[in-house]
Image (cartoon, rainbow, N blue to C red):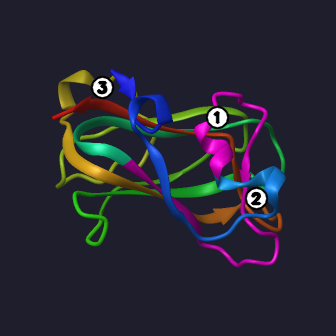
Amino acid sequence: MKNLAMPDNGGCIDSFSSQYHHESRCLNLMNRDPCLVWFSHNLAPLPQHFIIKLEKLSQVKRVGIYIHGENNQNPKHIQIHVSTDGTKFTKLVDAEIEQRSGDFLYDLNGLDHVIERVNIFDKENTQSVNAQFVKFEFTENYGGSGVYVAKAYVFGEGL
């Protein structure tokens, strides 16, 4: 499986709610350097989000994020939604995130199941979904003035 969110696999940022300044821009999510992050604007209220557009309609099997460090801007609650057209989104992940650095990955289980915890490598229940747009939404943090994320993952295969 490839990370379809990466530009060399056809992914791009479609839109985002805010960014702090050019050093913390949303485009940093497209860079493979985990030290570069997207940081939402410190004056913008939660929820904050970004939407990744895949090159084409794809079978998405696993989604998630990477958080670089531990601080009060870490996301505490994440929702991940998918769409085939960029207008109507279906929520597939609605989960609490531990206050730690590292990967938070979610294997999808079709359009009718909302994942509520990290569940990677749950092969018997994994079911891919068709999507071209993936929305990462952060509804709560650990008390800081914004939210930051280092990487976004959208694993799957093009149709």
Quarter occupied by the N terminus: top left
- Amino acid bearing label 1: Asn
Residue 84 position (above or below residue 157):
below
How far apart are the alpha carbons under marks 1 and 3?
28 Å
Name the residue carrying label 1: 31
Mark found first going from the N terminus, 1 or 3: 1
> At 49% across and 36% down in the image, what residue appears?
7
Q: Foreground: 34 or 66?
A: 34
Quarter occupied by the C terminus: top left
Helix, strand, or loop for circle 2?
Answer: loop
Q: Is residue 36 left or right of residue 94?
A: right
What mark, if any, has residue 122 been given in the picture? Answer: 3
- Amino acid bearing label 3: Asp
Q: Position of residue 50 (x, y in %)?
A: 53, 60
Q: Foreground: 112 or 44?
A: 44
Q: Position of residue 153 (x, y in %)?
A: 48, 36
What mark, if any, has residue 79 been given in the picture? Answer: none
**Nearer mark to the viewer, of 1 and 3:** 1
Name the residue carrying label 2: 142
How far apart are the alpha carbons under marks 1 and 2?
25 Å
How far apart are the alpha carbons under marks 3 and 2?
28 Å
Q: How many circles with numbers are drawn on the protein? A: 3
